[in-house]
Amino acid sequence: MKHVFRWAAVCSFAALVACSNPQESKKADNKPAQETYIGPKDIKLKSDVMTPEVLWSMGRLSDEQISPDGKHILYGVSYYDVPLNKSNRDLYILDTDGNNAKQLTKTPRGIYSATWTPDGKKIAYMSFESGSMQLWTMTTDGTNPTQISDIENGISGFKFSPDGKKVLLVREIYPEKKFKELYKDLPQTTGRVEDDLMYRHWDVWVDSYPHPFIADFDGNKLNNIVDIMEGEPYESPVKPWGGTEQISWSPDGKTIAYTSRKLVGKDYALSTNTDVYLYNIDTKKTQNLSEGIMGYDQNPVFSPNGKMLAWESMKRNGYEADRNRIMIRNIETGENQEYTKEFDNDAHGLTWSENGENIFFISNKQAKDQIFKLNVANKNIKQITEGAHNYQSVTPVNGKLIARRMSISMPSEIYNVDPESGEAKQITFTNKNTLDQLKMGKVEERWIETTDGKKMLTWVIYPPHFDPNKKYPAILYCQGGPQSGVSQFFSFRWNFQMMAANDFIVVAPNRRGVPGFGQEWKEQISKDYPGQNMNDYFSAIDALAKEPFVDEDNLAAVGASYGGFSVYWLAGHHNKRFKAFIAHCGMFNLESMYTETEEMWFVNWDLGGAYWEKDNKTAQRSFANSPHKFVDKWDTPILVVHGQNDYRIPFNQGMGAYNAAKLKGIPAEFLYFPDENHWVLKPQNGILWQRTFAGWLNKWCKK
């Protein structure tokens, strides 16, 4: 998730290592839990249908890296241990044609952001040492691990210069306190004083910000570490999810392009205006390349000859779901041009072809993420791949494409893709043993007519042992975002196959507001939460309820984030359609939400303004349709889930909904996680989430 700051579940580097931090996870004998190795296991399943335990046993593949000679692929796989309540990540390697696959490391420490050194002779990576993340190298056979950094508070990212003589590091800057410690007689006080907005972000209180640093590298250690944004109180990469994809070396190693939102406090909270900057290493001068473009500008990538720089760009400030365009700057002339004016969908994950003539990218088209190719000379765009899947990345190498993809029925694997025909060959098989023992439910693509006469793609997922002569309860899945795609994703929490394995029909509509169907379809939801997208939900569930195999008397609606809001809203408007609801981290009271969330640009754009703006008809309509104002019509059992560390949609939103249901005498449960944020990341919490989810639906929809 990561390309656009959605309010839905995307994973970040911080999330990836959350359960691997030796300071956060201890064994019973008080030794660091990372001393126990966690890796792949050949598991003999007791049943051929998905269970929470099986889901959490699967390896999670990510971050594939191509060797400089184009012959090998390096990638990481994370495995989770539920009893230890932690994860571990190791490296694997194979040839780009899929041969000679092997596990490269077997360490209990965890290895992150691994990549080849520019000469291809070593592998560089990050790992914990004495409680902080440091930079390491190893030989390409996985031996001789060597720590090459010893930086206070550690690092969160790195990139080698093309010649390997310098390393870009991402470090946190801890400025002085905003106020003086006046009361020396209160040494144990935990209070803090804030005097501006943006004092907390996503799941942390803001005490620092990341900066890119440059260090000389002599092959053994780092020297002359320099902050390229020294003295600037701004962040790069941009929080909460930005990583080194937001920073890029020029091919000659003389300049660095980086992403930053050079705002603080209230101005930061009200704006999405990030820019792409160019820093000259020799002159130490910085140039804003996207000045005047008011939305997100991020993820710069240089052409192979260094003469052009492409990045992802949005036009409008404060709107995270604006069309994500491809912008290219001619470095010599200083001219910026948009190259996707006629392309009515988003472009993400840009990579240049080896000859610099094309840019490959990912875009959602009709609820599937596909690979596209932009011809830079004539701006022609060609779709390369077809099929029911989500491509997550693409890298051109030696006339082929190395790409990672997933589907509703399979977690991420690496594929070798023909750049002309789009034909794909799977070359990694991380979870083959487990998947071979599972029977997945059929995934069907349906086009359902909406109340305004449009056609809406809806995924229907059947139970794995579906019997057309039986009647099954059904789940309406409500997507978060609100502008996130209901695509071919394989989630380790909101897993459609997991839901279907519990003998439910899953109905997942691409309602108004999701990408992949043109900008007009996506934009309709903003400032109209109670409008057409809610009618789209009704259209989807009503259409499926007519099927002879659906038990129309036992329907449920579930969702997280905006999906949680949707559930709360449906609870007051469903006219007896549903027998149960589940809302995870949803918005319940929009008035309190407006002043409690952290990134204010979102509520300003999507709700239309503040609730105290009495002459603002758009805002007043939004707040008049807040779910909490329809609790008098609630009549259906509801499970509410929320995490204490969710600062995007604070946990009191969930608590308010739960309390309202109990005061109304409605059967309700509150699943509360004191150590989770907007997501549920820890293994045992994840298992509890799945068991509670299924138990609630079984209780109320299988009578």
Image (cartoon, rainbow, N blue to C red):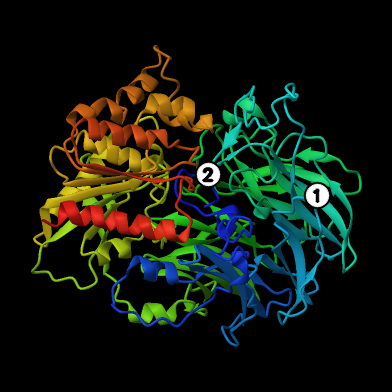
Q: Is residue 93 above or below residue 448?
A: below
Q: Is residue 677 above or below residue 394?
A: above
Q: Is residue 4 above or below residue 180?
A: below
> At which x and y percent is residue 343?
49, 49
| 498 or 485: nearer the viewer | 498
Would you identify the image quadrant in which residue 337 lies?
top right
> At which x and y percent is residue 109?
65, 68
Residue visible at 38% across and 68% down in the picture: 53
Q: Which residue is mark 2?
A: 5
In the rendered image, is residue 546 in sight?
no
Task: Tell me if 696 is positioned left or right of 684 in this view.
Answer: left
Q: Nearer the viewer, mark 1 or mark 2?
A: 1
Image disc number at residue 650 = none
Count of numbered circles on the image = 2
| 626 or 320: nearer the viewer | 626
Mark 1 or mark 2: whose residue is earlier in sequence: 2
> At which x and y percent is residue 456?
28, 50
The alpha-carbon separation of the residues under discs 1 and 2 comes to: 25 Å
Task: Tell me if 151 is positioned left or right of 457 in this view.
Answer: right
Would you identify the image quadrant in which residue 126 lies?
bottom right
Badge 2 marks a residue whose secondary structure is loop
Q: Amino acid at mark 2?
A: Phe
Badge 1 marks a residue whose secondary structure is strand
Q: Amino acid at mark 1?
A: Phe
Q: Residues within 10 Å of mark 1 (few under 14, many from 20)?
A: some
In the rendered image, is residue 353 in sight?
yes
| 251 or 699: nearer the viewer | 699
Q: Which residue is mark 1?
A: 213
